Amino acid sequence: MALTLVPDSSSRDIPGPKSKELMELRKKYLPESVSNATPLFAAEAKGAIITDVDGNEFIDFAGGIGVLNVGSCPIEVVNAIKDQVERLIHTSSVMLHEPYVRVAEKLCTITPGDTPKKAFLVNSGAEAVENAVKIARKYTGRRGVIALENSFHGRTMLTSTLTSKAKPYKVGFGPLATDIYRVPSPYCYRCSFGQTYPGCTLECAKALKKILDTEVAPEDVAAIILEPIQGEGGFIVLPNEYLRYVKELCEEHGFVLIADEIQSGWGRSGKLFAIEYSGIEPDILTTAKSIAAGLPLSAVVAKADVIDSVHKGGIGSTYSGNPVACAAALKVMEMMEKYNLPQRANHLEEILLNRLSVIKEKYPFIGDVRGRGAMYAVEFVKDKAAKEPVTNEISKIMELCLQRGLIVIKAGTYNNVIRFLPPLVIKDEQLVKGLDIFEESIALVFNA
């Protein structure tokens, strides 16, 4: 059956003259090392639609890299920001303000587990991870941190060391942080141990015990850090059995379990936090991205005895817990409940999984479709048997999607994954149209 194409957008000038003009300024005044996924400049956005400076509209499947779960510029958040800006913008630690305490209160209530918790606010995902590691080391009196392959935890010196991708995050920046140890992740599509999930013997989990015999003694390990769904690694969903095994290992040896929910949190996975699927309670949870609908805010939520092990003044930041960002976060939390956005993510998953499964069967160069909720990815390969990654074609697909009015971004250790992070408020028809554009684009690139 012939593929039904979306209306042709090839007559549009993308990038348009204003974007081209701004790109010249960008080249002159911004370092080349600061990357951008498209050659466009946004002018405004609403819900799941972005309009560039030339008036071109695009369906947003990137969601600000997982930041816009409640959509772009929701009126509830905009009004909360306006109200807060008119009353108080900044105090730092000189004087506390109510929104900070209210955000912390809510975080301690909604994050997984019944253990008493406390929350500390900072500005970015990397800053949250940095502080989580500091807290874990202070609590345990140990230095070692175990991280997984295919992980991403940030681009500061410590977090780029925790991140498992040499280019572009590590190359040329050494020496990196010390006392970081790497283990295989449960990347089931590319199992390091040649097994097939489910029904495997979880050799990836057993590798954690091996590293304690060969690389670092248990009494030197402060924490294990992991993403329940590995984001930049290509939306690798860690099996619940694996997560439970890690939790048991942490309890056996006194490790702190840090759950990095920076990309997978705030309803994205179909639950408020993806770690909830496993039924375990992390000792520390880091969250950012969609917490404040685009304003810079992140949080470290930890068991009270863990975070209270830090001496006064040991953690903090000039801009942390900014009143305006906190006001936005409170409204985001309200919207999560009011509109049941985690459940909305499950509805979007039905559409995504049904369509992407059909596409996978139709085209031999799609090796895997995976994800949870409204966090899905497609991995491209040269053939399904060898699983050799393709790379150049990914950029071509992204470019064709852009020309036709869809924004997508890539991921994966081999840069051969296209990931979908649409706002949870995206309309069904917008999601379906975006998937039409996506299929049309891959068909054109591979001459299918």
Image (spheres, helix red, strand yellow):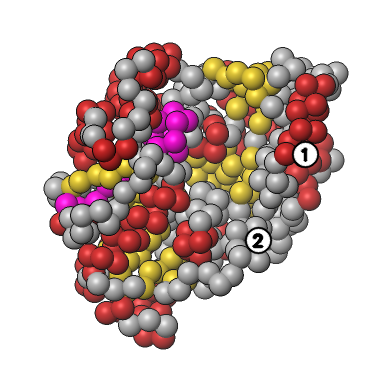
Give the side of residue 356 with respect to residue 319, left or right.
right
The earlier-in-sequence mark between 1 and 2 is: 1
Q: Which residues are magenta?
A: 289-304
Image location (x, y in percent) of residue 268 = 43, 36
Image location (x, y in percent) of residue 144 = 36, 73
Give the side of residue 265 with respect to residue 305, left or right.
right
Query: Against 75, is 275 above or below?
Result: below
Q: Nearer the viewer, residue 117 or 174?
A: 174
Q: Residues within 10 Å of mark 2 (few under 14, many from 20)?
A: few
Q: Residues within 10 Å of mark 1 (few under 14, many from 20)?
A: few
- Is residue 76 shown in magenta? no
Judging from the image, what secondary structure is the residue with disc 1 in?
Answer: helix
Image location (x, y in percent) of residue 47 = 52, 19
Residue where numbered disc 2 is placed = 167
- Amino acid type of the residue tagged 2 in the rendering: Lys
- Amino acid type of the residue tagged 1 in the rendering: Lys
Image location (x, y in percent) of residue 233 = 55, 54
- Report the residue at 44% width, 36% height from top: 296
- Report the residue at 74% width, 54% height from top: 390
Give the farthest residue toward the bottom: 214
- Report the residue at 26% width, 65% height from top: 138
- Given contact means CB atoms under 8 Å apart, are the residues at marks 1 and 2 in contact? no
Q: Nearer the viewer, residue 143 or 83?
A: 83
Query: Against 155, is 425 above or below?
Result: above
- Judge whether residue 343 can be spotted in this image: no
Query: Against 381, is 183 above or below?
Result: below
- Report the residue at 48% width, 34% height from top: 67
Judging from the image, what secondary structure is the residue with disc 2 in?
Answer: loop
- Please identify, in this view, whether the residue under mark 1 or under mark 2 is nearer the observer: 1
Residue where numbered disc 1 is placed = 28
Q: How many marks?
A: 2
Q: Quadrant of the C terminus?
A: top right
